[in-house]
Image (cartoon, rainbow, N blue to C red):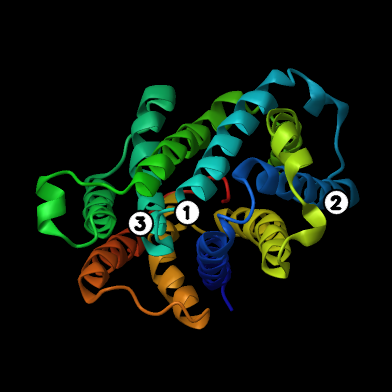
Amino acid sequence: MTPQAQGHLAMLLFSALVAGSFSLGGMVANDITPLALNAVRFVIAAIVLGIVAMVTTGIPRSALAAPWRYLVLGGLFIIYFVLMFEGLKTSAPVSSAAVFTLVPAMAGIFGWFLLRQRMTPRIAMALCFGGLGALWVIFRADLAAVLAFDVGRGEVIFFFGCIAHAIYTPLVRVLNRGESALVFAFGTLVAGAILLMVLGARDIVATNWLNLRPLVWLTILYVAICASSITFVLVQFATMRLPSAKVMAYTYLVPVWVICWEVGLGNGLPPIGIVAGVVLTVLALLLLLRDEDGPPVQVKAQ
């Protein structure tokens, strides 16, 4: 298998694992507060990545310089995840996944302001197709809802979380001072865990941890290990083998995987009209996967 094929396989698995967090999160969103769930999730993910960092690259003292950087990035990251689970209380997983596909376009805008990054016309067209497909799903394939701008409460909440994620992506480059991606992510997760322990202290204490459904614990472990630690490794693996546009492209496959997850979990298929929006996001994926010269670029995992 060629290095490029390995990169594509890694991102295919990445998109499938990220999609699982939407479906599982939607099933337990009303069982536990987002602050409590993510506090435990960040602690577990930080421990896992910390162990990996210690046995591989190590954690140099220089990485401890300017710890405020990790607090800024960790703050943006927890805003994204907390609002994701808050939105899933009232939003369908497929709709939330569609909102998530707006992140590349928003990251491109913030990337221009922060880094003066430019995009090719083809990438811009792909982002437009992906955005249109996402909006069609978000508005539940209802033209009347589009004209009335009738957006669900959960989608609106998660959209603001996605803005935080979009700011986070280029800001990683601005604030990184030469630390390895693994060490930098570990610092971000530790800072996020500390912030969540402080901000969510009341929710953590009030949660009856011993009486949570097994599915809640399964979801916590899944999002901590599969949708955080493993996806991070997969993205880092892929960015060494693929151009950044192709890595970014797999974001648009997440709604397709969410539909598969929903069927597999017995939640049924979405309305046929919504599938049209998903098809547009897949078209965006195909446009971004077309051959394009350019070196691989580091990006952050879900």
Q: Quadrant of the N terminus?
A: bottom right
Q: Residue furthest toward the right?
A: 55
- Please tell me which of labels 2 and 3 falls first in the chain: 2
Left or right of 35, for residue 54: right
Q: CA distance from mark 1 to mark 3?
A: 12 Å
Return the residue at label 1.
Answer: 88
Residue sitting at x 74%, y 28%: 198
Residue sitting at x 57%, y 32%: 172
Q: Nearer the viewer, residue 138 or 281?
A: 138
Check contact, mark 1 vs mark 3: CB within 8 A.
no
Q: Would you call the spot at circle 3 few (<14 residues within 10 Å), some (14-19), or many (20 or more)?
A: many
The answer to whether residue 30 is above or below residue 109 is below
Q: What secondary structure is found at the residue carrying circle 1?
A: loop
Q: What secondary structure is found at the residue carrying circle 2?
A: loop
Residue sitting at x 46%, y 39%: 161
Q: Amino acid at mark 3?
A: Ala
Q: Nearer the viewer, residue 274 or 253?
A: 274
Return the residue at label 2.
Answer: 56
Q: What secondary structure is found at the residue carrying circle 3?
A: helix
The answer to whether residue 274 is above or below residue 107 is below
Q: Amino acid at mark 2?
A: Thr
Residue sitting at x 38%, y 60%: 252
Residue 90: x percent and y percent?
A: 42, 53
Return the residue at label 3.
Answer: 98
Q: CA distance from mark 2 to mark 3?
A: 36 Å
The answer to whether residue 94 is above or below residue 41 is below
Quarter of the rendering containing residue 149: top left
Residue 212 visible in the picture: yes
Q: Nearer the viewer, residue 276 or 286?
A: 276
Q: Would you call the spot at circle 2 few (<14 residues within 10 Å), some (14-19), or many (20 or more)?
A: few
- Please tell me which of labels 1 and 2 falls first in the chain: 2
Quarter of the rendering containing residue 36: top right
